[in-house]
């Protein structure tokens, strides 16, 4: 809606940008954080390779090295280095934080990273992160490559499935599929209703709408953040061990996940039909029914089937803690080391997941 | 059609709209549209034409000013009162804005939503006489046999005719048409414009229509209003629209179309 002449003339030069002062502070904060990470990892690696002994006289492990770093001094040093870089940026080139806040215009010829201090800094930072990660996660390549025989029992069992649990496994597989189905089915109406309140384009019109939006989003993100395993434990205490607890646990998780997926679809709709229906004098519910819902039904169906697929996979783990399904008989066999029977159950689960995946892909292909 | 002196259909007083991003889409626009008039609004893209139309039925809330439609203050109306006023204003869009997955007939029926009972409309169970009327509206735009098709199975020109049938179904007294033929093949433009003209001539509906093509403007407009940067820069008959006014509206660089007379002197 702007006149093109005002947009080209009205764009301020980067130096005169009134936001530059704020941008400078953000850039400094980013720089100091990056430099802090950099020096932390340098000291970490130095300590790890110095063969240093801890207070007990033993060689310290990477975990204990984390405890020995000079956090305070390094923070001060990074602050000084960050300020220094900002001050001398015309000699050293733009700092990473500055480059992040002020991406170069399209007309600027990009300088290869090997020619800038920023480029070298970031490259070294990535390299340092990799080596630090190697030490912290205690990667042991040699053991990985030479000690396979220790696991051969398990692998042999998995590829030689025993028929002892086949019958019980099949029955519980049916329970697993239905468990996932019921969790999805219960989740659909709840998620459908709340997804409209979680869509920004429908709620930004009024203060009440924005409050509802934020509340629904907060509850949704919380219930999504809590692992289904934890929900299962809650519902096992609530309704007792068994598949229903599993249904409830997956239900909570599915509602949150579906609200998120559904509401994203609602946010992506074409506003044209919504305007057209509003223009006829229709009320809010009629606008939803005629302007919004017809546009979101196909993606909703597609996501629901996808969710069922995910629920089948998740219900295996839910069964580990007593939430019903095939996981319920899998866990004790893992604990007892009955690898042949574990192999049978794992193959059953794999076959089901594979079949669900193909099925859901085919259906979604047809709907959208 | 009434025989008395034409009354005022729309009166716009000092209308201004500033969008939240600071763009001034309309500034101090005042207009009057007589009942039964076919008013064409012209101007460059971004001159405020669409905003003006959407302020009249309050799809957009104006920042300042007043709009009266058939004597009712639209700018002061809220909730149910606003929805009742909207039922008097049919709207036709550049992108047709049909519900693509619904049948053509249901799209036409949705024109009556503002007047139909809530529960029945949510269940999409419209009374038989409404369905009959919707079929008649489709017949009117020459699509009587396409009622069962899905809306997106139709061509662009046919979809716009469905949109006209939807507006007709609404039985409004005012039609707001926002670039109704801009996304259509040039060969189809007159066929759609003739249907809108028929709403004006045969049904006595007042029409406010935004257009780009000079030949369409000269063929259909009773009167012309031109916007530039959100201000009215020309108001008058289509016959006074010449090369000079064309440049005033579209800017000095614009090339007047061959069909326009040079300004005298």
Image (cartoon, coloured by chain):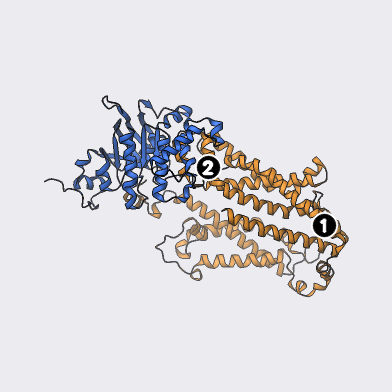
Chain colours: A orange, B blue
**Residue A9 visible (yes or no):** no
The residue under label 2 is: A292
Secondary structure state at the residue bearing disc 2:
helix
Residue found at x 58% / y 50%? A299
Q: Residues within 10 Å of mark 2 (few under 14, many from 20)?
A: many
Q: Position of residue B181 (x, y in %)?
A: 35, 47
* Nearer to us in this view, A98 or B177: B177
Q: Nearer the viewer, residue B154 or B55?
A: B154
Side of B127 relative to A242 (left or right): left
Query: Can you say whether A59 is above or below A32 in the image?
Result: below
Q: Position of residue B74 (x, y in %)?
A: 40, 29
Which numbered disc, 2 or 1, marks the residue that appears first in the sequence?
1
Tell me which corner region of the image, top left, top right, bottom left or bottom right, holds residue A129.
bottom right
Q: Which mark is residue A169?
A: 1
Residue at image x 30%, y 41%?
Answer: B41
Neighbour class for label 1 at 10 Å: few (<14), some, many (≥20)? many
Q: Is residue A206 left or right of residue A146?
A: left
Point 23% across, 45% down: residue: B248
- Same chain check for tags 2 and 1: yes
- Report if residue A363 is visible in the image: yes
Label 2 resides on the chain identified as A
Above or below, B107 relative to A318? above
User: What whole-number distance in Å separates the C-alpha atoms at marks 2 and 1?
Assistant: 44 Å
Q: Are marks 2 and 1 in contact (CB under 8 Å)?
A: no
């Amino acid at each position: 809606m702007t006149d093109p002449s005002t947009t080209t003339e009205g764009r301020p030069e980067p130096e005169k940008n009134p936001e530059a002062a704020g941008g400078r502070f953000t850039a400094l904060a980013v720089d100091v954080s990056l430099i802090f990470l950099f020096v932390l990892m340098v000291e970490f690696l130095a300590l790890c390779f110095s063969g240093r002994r801890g207070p007990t006289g033993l060689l310290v492990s990477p975990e204990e090295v984390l405890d020995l770093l000079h956090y305070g001094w390094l923070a001060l040093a990074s602050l000084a280095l960050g300020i220094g870089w900002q001050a001398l940026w015309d000699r050293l080139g733009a700092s990473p934080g500055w480059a992040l806040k002020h991406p170069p215009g399209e007309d600027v010829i990009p300088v290869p990273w090997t020619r800038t201090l920023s480029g070298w800094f970031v490259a070294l930072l990535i390299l340092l992160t990799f080596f630090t990660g190697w030490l912290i996660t205690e990667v042991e390549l040699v053991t990985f490559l030479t000690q396979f025989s220790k696991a051969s029992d398990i692998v042999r069992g998995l590829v030689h499935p025993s028929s002892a649990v086949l019958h019980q496994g099949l029955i519980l597989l049916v329970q697993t599929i239905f468990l996932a189905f019921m969790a999805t089915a219960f989740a659909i109406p709840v998620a459908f209703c709340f997804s409209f309140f979680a869509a920004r384009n429908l709620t930004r019109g009024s203060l009440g709408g924005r409050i509802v939006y934020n509340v629904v989003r907060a509850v949704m993100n919380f219930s999504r953040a809590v692992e289904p395993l934890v929900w299962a434990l809650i519902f096992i205490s609530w309704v007792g061990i068994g598949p229903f607890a599993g249904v409830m646990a997956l239900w909570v998780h599915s509602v949150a996940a579906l609200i998120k997926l559904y509401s994203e679809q609602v946010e992506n709709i074409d506003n044209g039909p919504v305007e057209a229906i509003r223009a006829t004098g229709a009320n809010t519910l009629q606008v939803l029914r005629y302007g919004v819902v017809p546009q979101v039904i196909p993606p909703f169906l597609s996501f629901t089937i996808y969710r069922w697929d995910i629920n089948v996979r998740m219900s295996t783990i839910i069964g580990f803690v007593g939430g019903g399904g095939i996981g319920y008989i899998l866990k004790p066999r893992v604990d007892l080391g009955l690898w042949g029977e574990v192999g049978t159950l794992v193959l059953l689960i794999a076959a089901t997941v594979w079949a669900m995946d193909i099925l859901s892909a085919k259906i979604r292909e047809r709907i959208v | 059609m009434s025989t008395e002196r034409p009354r005022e259909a729309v009166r716009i007083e000092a209308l201004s709209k500033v969008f939240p991003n600071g763009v001034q889409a309309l500034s101090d626009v005042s207009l009057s549209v007589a009942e039964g008039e076919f008013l064409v609004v012209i101007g460059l893209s971004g001159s405020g034409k669409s905003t003006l139309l959407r302020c009249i039925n309050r799809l957009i809330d104006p920042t300042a000013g007043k709009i009266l439609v058939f004597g009712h203050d639209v700018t002061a109306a809220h909730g149910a009162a606003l929805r009742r006023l909207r039922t008097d204003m049919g709207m036709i869009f550049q992108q047709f804005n049909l519900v693509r997955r619904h049948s053509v007939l249901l799209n036409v029926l949705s024109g009556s939503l503002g007047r139909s009972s809530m529960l029945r409309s949510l269940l999409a169970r419209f009374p038989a006489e409404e369905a009959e009327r919707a079929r008649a509206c489709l017949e009117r735009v020459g699509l009587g046999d396409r009622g069962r098709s899905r809306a997106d199975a139709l061509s662009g020109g046919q979809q716009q005719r469905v949109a006209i049938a939807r507006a007709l179904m609404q039985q409004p007294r005012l039609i707001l048409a926002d670039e109704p033929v801009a996304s259509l093949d040039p060969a189809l433009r007159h066929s759609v414009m003739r249907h809108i003209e028929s709403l004006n001539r045969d049904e006595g509906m007042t029409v406010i229509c935004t257009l780009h093509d000079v030949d369409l403007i000269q063929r259909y407009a009773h009167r012309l209003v031109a916007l530039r940067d959100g201000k009215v820069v020309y108001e008058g008959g289509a016959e006074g629209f010449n090369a000079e006014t064309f440049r005033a509206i579209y800017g000095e660089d614009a090339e007047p179309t061959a069909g326009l007379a040079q300004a005298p002197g």
